[in-house]
Image (tube, grey):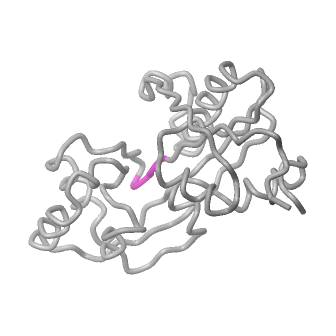
Amino acid sequence: MALWLAAKPLVLASRSVARCALLEAAGIPVELYPADIDERASEADAASSDPAVIAAHLARVKAAIAARSYPGRLVLGADQTLAFDGERFVKPVDRSAAREQLLALSGCTHQLHSAIAFAQNASVVFQYIGVARLTMRSLSDRFIDLYLDAAGAAAMTSVGAYQVEGSGIQLFERIEGDYFTILGLPLLAALDFLRQSGYLAS
């Protein structure tokens, strides 16, 4: 008997390879529907500068957009923000911006807020925000350049210019929080909701 009990796969309102892989590894079939939104414009609608609130708002918006294209289906939206010293970082646009982010975070602790929202039809039926604290080592200019050489284009695909599941783990001296939250999908909370809602075997 399969763990996933629904007749159709979960719709993931994202193009994230990491999120898709996490869900599929947990036994959840996934159908991708990248909810392409103007995140900077949508953030203004959140009416808050709180990184956790913004992450939750964007997750809800993505889920709602995809749910309109999949009537009756369960849709998962997700988003992640990085907060440091009163500032919220976004994905670096190029190597220079990635280098600036790493220099700013070097030797310091920052927070990742990872939000998920499940939607069905016109309603958000569950949402959750996970928080993790990550402390970077003090990084030399030489190491930053070596790291960016090794990471290549991947450094521009994640806020903070790192992916802890790859070479980005070498940037850190301490990590506090759930590993899945750091990857951008608080998986344990998602699985708990899916079990309680009858989508997963319990």
Count of number-bearing discs: 0
Tell me if residue 113 can be seen: no
Tell me if residue 94 can be seen: yes
Q: Is residue 48 left or right of residue 109?
A: right
Farthest residue to the bottom: give it.
173
Quarter of the figure that contains the N terminus: bottom right
Tell me what residue is drawn at x 60 percent, y 68 percent. 178
Farthest residue to the left: give it.
142
The quarter of the displayed image where residue 13 is located:
top right
Q: Is residue 73 left or right of residue 155?
A: right
Tell me what residue is drawn at x 53 percent, y 28 percent. 35
Image height of 127 relative to 65, above or below: below
Quarter of the figure that contains the C terminus: bottom right
Tell me what residue is drawn at x 49 percent, y 28 percent. 43
Magenta stretch: helix, strand or loop mostly: strand
Q: Position of residue 27 (x, y in %)?
A: 70, 60
In the image, 45 versus 73, the foreground residue is 73
Image height of 185 relative to 10, above or below: below
Q: Is residue 32 left or right of residue 153?
A: right
Q: Position of residue 197 (x, y in %)?
A: 89, 47
Image height of 43 relative to 179, above or below: above
In the image, 201 versus 97, the foreground residue is 201
Q: What segment is highlighted magenta in the picture?
A: 81-85
Does the stretch in magenta take in 191? no
Q: Is residue 160 left or right of residue 51?
A: left
Q: Position of residue 52 (x, y in %)?
A: 58, 45
Tell me what residue is drawn at x 19 percent, y 66 percent. 150
The quarter of the displayed image where residue 145 is located:
bottom left
